[in-house]
Image (cartoon, rainbow, N blue to C red):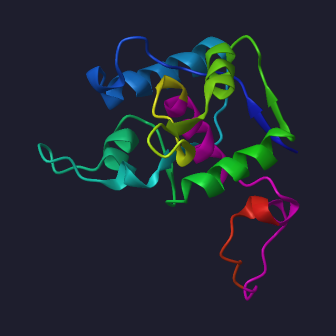
Amino acid sequence: MGSRGFGFYRDLVCAVRWSLNHYADVLHDKRRQHGWTYGEHFFPHDIAVREFTSGKSRLNTLASLGIEATVVPEYDVLEGINVVRRMLGRTWIDPVRCERGLEALRGYRREYDERLRDWKKSPLHSWESHGCDSLRCFATGFDDTPSALAPRRRNSEPRSRGTHWSD
């Protein structure tokens, strides 16, 4: 089956400047403009954090805006990068609508430690890392493996600690 990448959105100003309303509007506008039917919207674990001002979680705010969010558990960054690597071979990405996302993938890199003269384990924090973090969140949340698509038994064995991409 594989996953499909139809679009990549990154505002050119600053993500902090926009509210969740803005991003919900972008999703609704894209759906209407292209006739898309969305599957799931994957968000990182911290989407459930409550805002100090309203006491509502971002998850609740998105739901009130018509966006049903799927919360992805927190994963180790390096494990998530490997999940993306395994997923990309089964993924079709629209090269026009995802041009900036593909540019982010090409620019994603580790940080170099000048003092130790060695590469750090963590990625360099940049605009590219934000786009790649979004893809990593999707990859660790989306499950298109045959076992996920098959009917589930009631008393099945619990899954291993790894992600569904490490099968």
Query: Is 69 left, or right, of 82 in this rendering?
Result: left
Residue 29 to residue 44: above or below: above
Q: Position of residue 43 (x, y in %)?
A: 49, 46
Quarter-wise, where is residue 98 in the image? top right
Query: For the point 64% across and 57% down, which residue is it?
Result: 79
Q: Position of residue 63 (x, y in %)?
A: 39, 43
Q: Is residue 102 magenta?
A: no
Q: Quadrant of the C terminus?
A: bottom right
User: Looking at this view, is 80 or 52 the one in front?
Assistant: 80
Query: Is 124 left, or right, of 83 in this rendering?
Result: left
Q: Position of residue 157 (x, y in %)?
A: 75, 86
Quarter-wise, where is residue 156 in the image? bottom right
User: Looking at this view, is 95 or 128 the one in front?
Assistant: 128
Q: Is residue 142 visible?
A: no
Query: Is 55 left, or right, of 12 in this rendering?
Result: left
For the record, the magenta segment spans: 129-157
Query: For the point 48% across and 24% down, which residue is it?
Result: 127
Query: For the point 65% across and 18% down, which residue is it?
Result: 103
Residue 128 to residue 48: above or below: above
Query: For the point 65% across and 75% down, which residue is it?
Result: 161
Q: Is residue 147 visible?
A: yes
Q: Is residue 136 magenta?
A: yes
Residue 139 to residue 25: above or below: below
In the current view of this chain or complex, which residue is farthest to the left?
A: 53
Q: Quadrant of the N terminus?
A: top right
User: Looking at this view, is 114 or 132 the one in front?
Assistant: 114
